[in-house]
Image: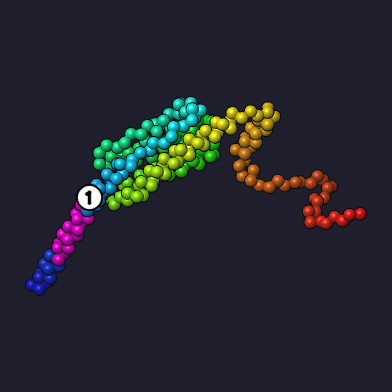
Amino acid sequence: MKYISIIIAVTFAATLFSCEEDDKQRRIDTIRAEKHNDSILKIISNNWSFEVAPPTPAVQQRIMTWSEWNQLMTELEQKPKGGINAYKQKTKNLVDKADRVRQNLPSMFAKPQVYSRLGVLVTKIKDLYTYLNVDVIQDKKVLKLIADTRQEITSVQNQLDEIIRISQIPKEQGEEEMLRALDTTRMANPDRMMQPEQVTPAPGMAMPDRNRTFTKP
C-alpha cells in the first residue's frame, strides 16, 4: 500500500510539472507572437491605404445615390486607430459592407460582369480579414491583399464606366427591341440558350443527311 501511494504521488507530481511546463511554453509563445504582431502592425499601418483614382464623372453621377457602395468607400477611407484589434474590427466591417454592395446593385449595373468583379472584391476583403485574425500575422500577405483590393476597386469602377458608355451608344429601334427580347429569353431560360438548335422535320419530310456527298451532274 505504501508503494502505491508513492507511485501515485510521483505520477501526480510529474503530471503537475508537465502542465506547468506547457503553460510556461504557451505564455512564451503568446508573448513572442504579440511582439511579432506589434512590429508587423507598424508595417501594416504605414501601408494601410485604399485610395484609388476617382471614378469618371459619368460613373460618379450614377453612384451618388448608391448608398451601399458609398458606405463601403467611406469605411475604406477611414484608417483604424489603435492596436491590431482595431484592424481586425475594421476588416470585419469591410466584409459586411462589401457583401451589402453585391446584394444591392442599381438596376443599371445588375449585370453578370459587375457581379463577377464585385465577387472578386468581396473575396479579397474576406481574405484580408482572415490573414489579420491568425496568431502570427504575415505582413507580406496582408500588404499584397491591400494592393489587390485597390486594384479590384478600380476594376469595378472601370466596369461601371464601360456599361454607361455602351448604354449611350445609339441603337436603332428594331435592334434595341431584339436585344431586349434576347436578354429576356436568356434570363428566363439560361440553360436552353447554351444548347444547339435542333430542327424538327415537318410531317412526311425526311431529315437531311449531313454526311451525304453530292456530285455534279
Q: Quadrant of the N terminus?
A: bottom left
Say if 69 sits above or below 125 in the image: above
Asked whether residue 176 is drawn in magenta, I would say no
- Label 1 element class: helix
Q: Position of residue 40 (x, y in %)?
A: 28, 48
- Which stretch is magenta? 14-31
**Which residue appears at 36% of the width and 46% of the height?**
143
Q: Position of residue 149 (x, y in %)?
A: 41, 42
**Residue type at mark 1?**
Lys
Whether residue 67 is visible: yes
Chosen colour scheme? rainbow
**Which residue appears at 61% of the width and 44% of the height?**
191
Asked whether residue 15 is drawn in magenta, I would say yes
Q: Quadrant of the C terminus?
A: bottom right
Is residue 3 or residue 89 the one in the foreground?
A: 89
Is residue 49 or residue 185 the one in the foreground?
A: 49
**Which residue appears at 49% of the width and 27% of the height?**
57
Query: What is the quadrant of residue 52 in the picture?
Result: top left
Q: Which residue is mark 1?
A: 35
**Residue at the farthest right position:** 217
